[in-house]
Amino acid sequence: GGVGKTTLARIIYKNKDIKRHFQFCAWVSVLEEYSTKDILLNLFKATQSITDKPINMDDEKVVKLKLSSYLKNKRYLVILDGLSTCNNLEVLKETLPDEKNGSKLLLTCLQTIETPQMKIVSHRMMPLTEDDSWNMFREKIGKEQSWALVPEKSKLAILQSCKGLPLA
């Protein structure tokens, strides 16, 4: 945790060119206790502002059908931030139509998720190098004229404490 997965996904999601490329974009922050139904409901709520047709939100099959129907023939970007298991992916695969039109499902997760039913392209994020960590730290703190005054011992302590994780 803290390597920058959510930050990178957020940069992608908020990019104006990406927003123009996709006809529908949705971001779902997946909490540890989220069920597949919770994810589907959050996705469907993102379409409701567009469709504005009330449905029975307690019926998971109806939500899946309506969501799938809405997304059919649309190029969509769905980001699931914080997914912990691939259990949800099977149901989502059934719900998110694969029209071979460039739609994307982007997942951020702590562990690599592998499932034989879906082709997943992974990008493993790595901690920053010591130089990059120090430069980021200096950039965030500012006061450039004071950096020469920082003892090497303090610099090393900061770098060891952060372990290359931007969030740290």
Image (cartoon, rainbow, N blue to C red):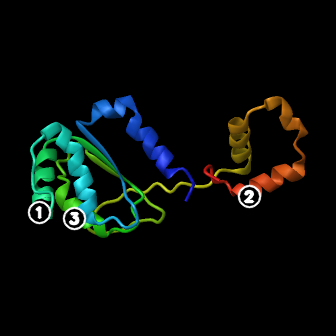
Which residue shows up at 53% across the image and 54% down it? 125
Which residue shows up at 44% across the image and 60% down it? 109
User: Which amino acid type is marked by label 2?
Assistant: Ser
In percent of width and height, residue 89 lies at: 28, 64
Q: Is residue 158 left or right of residue 43?
A: right
Circle 2 — which element? Answer: helix
Q: CA distance from mark 1 to mark 2?
A: 48 Å
Per the image, the residue denoted by label 2 is 161
In percent of width and height, residue 91 lies at: 22, 64
The numbered mark at residue 91 is 3
User: Which amino acid type is marked by label 3?
Assistant: Val
Per the image, the residue denoted by label 1 is 61
Other residues around mark 1 within 10 Å, as few (<14) / some (14–19) / many (≥20): few
Which residue shows up at 19% across the image and 43% down it? 47
Which residue shows up at 37% across the image and 29% down it? 16
Q: Is residue 138 left or right of residue 97?
A: right
In percent of width and height, residue 156 lies at: 82, 54
Circle 1 — which element? Answer: helix
Seen from the viewer's position, the closer of residues 147 and 48 is 48
Question: Between tags 3 and 1, which lies in front?
Answer: 1
* Sequence order check, earlier mark of 1 and 2: 1
When asked about the image quadrant of residue 134, the answer is top right
Q: Is residue 163 left or right of residue 101?
A: right
Other residues around mark 2 within 10 Å, as few (<14) / some (14–19) / many (≥20): few
Q: CA distance from mark 3 to mark 1?
A: 10 Å
Q: Do callouts 1 and 2 mark residues in contact (Cβ within 8 Å)?
A: no
* Sequence order check, earlier mark of 3 and 2: 3
Q: Do callouts 3 and 1 mark residues in contact (Cβ within 8 Å)?
A: no
